[in-house]
Amino acid sequence: MSNTDFALAVEDLTVSFDGFKAIDALTLYIDKNELRVIIGPNGAGKTTLLDLICGKTRASAGSIKFKNTELTKMAEHKRVRLGIGRKFQTPSIYENLSVFQNLEVSYPKGRSVFGALAFKCTDEVQAKVQVVAEEIGLSDKLDTEAGLLSHGQKQWLEIGMLLMQEPELLMLDEPIAGMSARERELTAELLKRICANRAVIVIEHDMDFVKQIAHKVTVMHQGKILAEGSMDKVQNDPKVIDVYLGH
Ligand code: ADP
Ligand code: MG
């Protein structure tokens, strides 16, 4: 297969922090419309891998190709424009703006808060906000101040803010941390919906949740891939049980 058949092709990727390889010659391919879950013990390099893909951290060696474009030397904002969205562990929503306004300011034409508030709300933006609000289950909360949302709803709003930019690759780092059981169920449904139009990478620890959403699971350990495949396959892999699931 050529690299164009994948949403993302990571090859021999390495990053060293003072000689310590947090990511060590890692190779990983993500298909278009795939929902991949990355698991592994703390310190395995999962967050660092997302940092490298989004451009927060620069690679020491190797290649990251997205839509057949080499990313490793590209600035972070250019990767966003190319279609890469990243959600960090702590949500960065505007607490004193409404749900509607949070989504509106995330529309690519009005990125800064002040620019977007002055910006006339066109039918196009309105329509997009409605579609995204529906996708994230917040249609009936559009006028609510974001600061008043539950923890889970804030997480969904931030996912919605990323969806406003129509990313072709969306990366989420531990999205259900701190959520209630019901919020976790709804998040699983949400993720299954949004991967219909894009590739999604999720880092997660909760194995019940991983089982519900994963197409394929990648297990990382010490900056490398320890195992990869179906949930069933990795769950029964003695190496995986030894370093991760057995604890
Ligand atoms: P995970 O998300 O799998 O728990 P991380 O990617 O956060 O793991 O971390 C992997 C390793 O890289 C850890 O040992 C961590 O301390 C180290 N690390 C991550 N970022 C940096 C950095 N900017 N400088 C130095 N060490 C780092
Ligand atoms: Mg992490």
Image (spheres, rainbow, N blue to C red):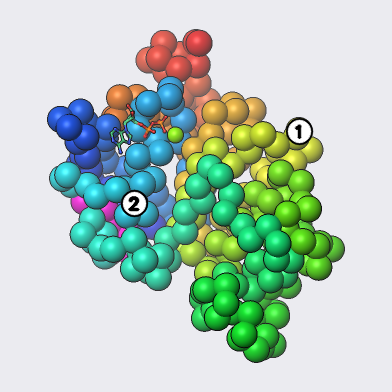
* Residue found at x 53% / y 68%: 166
Q: Nearer the viewer, residue 33 or 23?
A: 23
- For residue 226, above or below residue 55: above
- For residue 7, above or below residue 45: below
Residue 213 seen in the figure = yes
Amino acid found under the numbered disc labelled 1: Ala
Q: Which residue is mark 1?
A: 181
Name which of mark 1 and mark 2 comes first in the sequence. Answer: 2
Q: Which residues are magenta?
A: 63-68
Q: From the top left corner, tell me how far across and down residue 189 is, in percent.
A: 70, 47
Residue 99 seen in the figure = no
Q: Nearer the viewer, residue 104 or 224?
A: 104
Q: From the top left corner, tell me how far across and down residue 156 is, in percent.
A: 67, 52
Amino acid found under the numbered disc labelled 2: Lys
Q: Which residue is mark 2?
A: 56
Helix, strand, or loop for circle 2?
loop
Name the outermost residue toward the right: 140
Q: Nearer the viewer, residue 75 or 166?
A: 75
Q: CA distance from mark 1 to mark 2?
A: 32 Å
Q: Is residue 190 left or right of residue 76?
A: right
